[in-house]
Image (tube, rainbow, N blue to C red):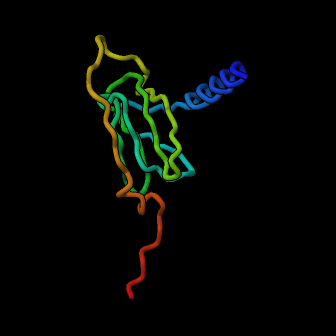
C-alpha cells in the first residue's frame, strides 16, 4: 500500500512540473489557461514581471535566467511552472531577492470578460 502511494505521489509531482514557459528577454509571453487565474507567485521577481493588460496575464522578461512560478486558479488548484527567460543563462552569483505574490482577484472581472451589470 505504501509503495503504491509513493508511486502515485511521484507521478503527480512530475506532472505538475512538466509545463514550462519561454519568455523572450525584454518581451512578454502570455500565461495561457482555460481557468481564471487568481494569484501568481514569482520565485525570483528580478527575472520576470507579471503584467495584466486587456484581460490577459503575461510574464515580461527582465533578466536572463530560470525561475519558477506558482499559479493559483479560481477553483483553488495550484500549478507550478518553470519560466525560462531569454536563453536561460543566469548571471554569476546567487540572487537573494524574496519571492513576490501578485493577487489578481481584483482584475478577475477583466480576465473573465464578464459583461457589465445593467443599471436598475
Which one is nearer the viewer's eye here, 34 or 74?
74
Q: Position of residue 89 (x, y in %)?
A: 40, 17
Q: Quadrant of residue 92?
A: top left
- What residue appears at the point 41 percent right and 23 percent down from the top-left corner? 66
Q: Residue furthest front?
A: 1
Q: What count of labels does the image hold?
A: 0
Q: Quadrant of the N terminus?
A: top right
Q: Quadrant of the C terminus?
A: bottom left
Q: Reply above or below: 51 against 95.
A: below
Extreme-left residue of the structure: 97
Q: Residue at x 45, y 40 (%)?
A: 29
Q: Where 100 falls versus 114 (above or below)?
A: above
- Image coordinates for residue 112, horizontal then vertical, percent: 48, 61
Hey, which quadrant is residue 19 in on the image?
top right
Left or right of 78? Residue 40 is left
Q: Residue at x 33, y 40 (%)?
A: 101
| Residue 8 on image: x %, y % | 68, 27
Q: Which residue shows up at 45% across the image and 29% down it?
A: 83
Residue 55 picture quarter = bottom left
Residue 113 at what x, y percent from top left? 47, 64
Amino acid at each position: 500500500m505504501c509503495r503504491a502511494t509513493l508511486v502515485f505521489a511521484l507521478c503527480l509531482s512530475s506532472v505538475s512540473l512538466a509545463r514550462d514557459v519561454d519568455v523572450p528577454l525584454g518581451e512578454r509571453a502570455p500565461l495561457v489557461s482555460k481557468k481564471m487565474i487568481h494569484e501568481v507567485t514569482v520565485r525570483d521577481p528580478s527575472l520576470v514581471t507579471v503584467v495584466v493588460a486587456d484581460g490577459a496575464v503575461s510574464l515580461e522578461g527582465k533578466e536572463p535566467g530560470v525561475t519558477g512560478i506558482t499559479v493559483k486558479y479560481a477553483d483553488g488548484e495550484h500549478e507550478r511552472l518553470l519560466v525560462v527567460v531569454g536563453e536561460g543563462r543566469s548571471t554569476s552569483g546567487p540572487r537573494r531577492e524574496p519571492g513576490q505574490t501578485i493577487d489578481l482577484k481584483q482584475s478577475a472581472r477583466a480576465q473573465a470578460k464578464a459583461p457589465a451589470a445593467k443599471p436598475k
